[in-house]
Amino acid sequence: MNCRIVFWMAMALAWAAEEKPPTAAKKEHVEVRHGATVNDPYFWLREKTSPEVISYLTAENAYTARMTAGQEKFAGKLYEEMLGRIKQTDLGVPFRRGSYFYYSRTEEGKQYPIQCRKKGSLEAPEEVLLDLNEIGKGQKFASVTAMSLSSDAMMLAYGTDFIGYRQFKLNVKDLRTGKLLPDSAERVTATAWAEGGRTVFYVTEDDVTKRSNQLWRLELGAKPELIYEEKDELYNITVEKTRDEKYLMLLIASTDTSEVMFLDANKPRSAFRSLAGRTKGHRYVADHREGLFYLLTNKGAKNFRIVTVPVSDPAEKHWKEFLAHNPDVLVQNIALYRGFAAVVEKTMALTRIRVFDFSAGKWKSIAFPEPVYAVFPEMTPDYESPTMRYSYQSLVSPRSIYDYTVTTGESQLLKRQEVLGGFDPAHYVSERLWATARDGVKVPLSLVYKRGLVRDGKAPLLMMGYGSYGFGMPPAFSSSRLSLLDRGVTYVIAHIRGGDEMGEKWHEDGMLMKKKNTFYDFIDSAEYLIREKWTSKDRLMIEGGSAGGLLMGAVVNLRPDLFRAVHAAVPFVDVMNTMMDATLPLTVGEYLEWGNPNEKQAHDYMKSYSPYDNLEKRAYPAILVTTSLHDSQVGYWEAAKYVARLRTLKTDSNDLLLKTKLEPAGHGGASGRYDQIKDLSFIYAWFLTQAGIEK
């Protein structure tokens, strides 16, 4: 064995044997930025293959295990609770595509769902399309992406990743024989089939920056051809097929601009044509129905509108209004069928679905029973379908699948998630509150708690937030969360600026030079909950992941006195070092969300809130930081550096724990359902222990 490895393994064991936490070495690393000298003594932790780095992370894991050893039994109890609510052997709701019914099912003891189909009827013999349990046998992590089925239903394209770095290998399976074809490619992020089932288009990413930038055409058995490459580093590309399967659509998008190119699916060797060009600030996507493209566009419409244009001449002068702009309603998506169009909208932090019946020429809205809920379109791939499938859930109602019949306006319940163990939604209460931010803006909060809660300021409360990329946090159901609610914890989602809950302006007011609104909204929401006696400072716990991890780091720096315990998952906390390094995955494309630090004004603003750069010598709340060594979206070193530096500054005796998955795992952690529950039980045990609840 390499002598250096032996040395550092010995050091790790020595660290683990001590009661005090590991201490990361300081090594000078100097850069000059806008005339100022910056020394980052923990920069060396980026050296992923270094034995010294692995040894340090191992020592931190050992320290975390030692400090939480007393919680192991409690975590085990929580795991059994969570697992006990799940129907481990279960069957998804089948959907029809062509002559087949497709569905997924799970089997007790197996980590992953099994994708299946039956021809003609549900009584027909089962055909297994994809069993990730078999594909990932012997692997600690397994993930599938970019799945697409040829129009003749005989070929299946999909990507596999066994590390967690989101680096997927293309596989093509002949469903007639069950065999994998020799056709393959690396770093595939999207696939779509031309008609005939012999030509598949796929997108690949750059091997360094992970930007999806190249479109390839592969005729099975032949050499793939590069047919488009996006040179602008601000843009990513993807490819998909229209629901009626007539066109292939190439979407080229940055944060603030997009372009759609289209190709007749029956003419795979033709050239893609631009639909509406590329104009700075114009964002649009498109689908096709009966000779018309339907464009979801923000031109003249901040919250988007929908226009139609003939395929034969898609010039803007031929645009016709299908759905007008409403400044109070964000139009998020449109799905087209022969008989109807379904539109997903968001207003007042709630999603709604409206359907246009082409034969009747009328809009209909689907009604939902609760004041706070989450609704999502589900798989309805059949263009001829008379129904649209959607899922409905809330913080107290398990996920339910419905088919909505357009002609009658009725929704038929197909399946409701079973929650075992005597769950009764009547035992829980969900509310929508509005906190007033310091600038007068009303911030929506979604709450759930066990009925009978006394609002005297003594109840523990867990608040989570995200607030970035225009991604809104849905008030969705979680059976695992019941383990918190049943122990008296109130759970809150803060729908802070930076998301899209209140429209596009909500996103714009929480990005770039307005990013601090995100942090202020979270703090002001926390103070509101304390004033209204939902909790108190010593009972308030918070959680966020990725950009939500940045949120955690920023609000703790701003108000370390306000929180009892913090979980920062895969946190984007080393903002300046990451954004100043254009060679890191995804960085350049992020300039439009956070700012370009090569411009001094943006640099100074970002630095003023970057968690790693604003740590100070003072008391901090208890902090748990979790990350994955193979995460490609937020480097593990951000968490490691943050903890290493904070250890030298914190003046309190509260927990500061770093837990790194050194085995294969991704940005979302483990891939298997049992492993995910185990990880969550550890986090919940830690939170509850911090709140003084230990059983």
Image: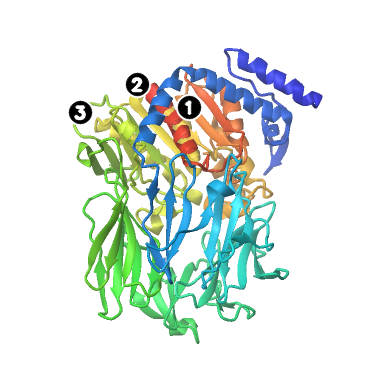
**Front residue of 666 and 80:** 80
> Which residue is labeled 2 in the image?
695
Nearest to N terminus: mark 3 or mark 1:
3
Find out whether the residues at labels 3 and 1 contact each other: C-beta distance under 8 Å: no
In the rendered image of this protein, does residue 327 appear above or below residue 564? below
- Tag in front: 2 or 3: 2
Q: CA distance from mark 3 to mark 1?
A: 27 Å
> Which residue is labeled 1 in the image?
623
Nearest to N terminus: mark 2 or mark 3:
3
User: Residue 95: image x %, image y %?
Assistant: 39, 63
Q: Quadrant of residue 320?
A: bottom left
The answer to whether residue 302 of the structure is visible from this angle is: no
Local SS, label 1: strand
**The N terminus is located in which quarter?**
top right
Q: CA distance from mark 2 to mark 3?
A: 20 Å
Q: CA distance from mark 2 to mark 1?
A: 21 Å
Q: For the residue marked with disc 3, what is the amino acid?
A: Val
Nearest to N terminus: mark 2 or mark 1:
1
Local SS, label 2: loop
Tell me if mark 3 has few (under 14), some (14-19) or many (20+) residues whose alpha carbon lies within 10 angstroms of its own.
Answer: few
Seen as rendered, the residue at the extreme bottom is: 312
> Which residue is labeled 3 in the image?
454
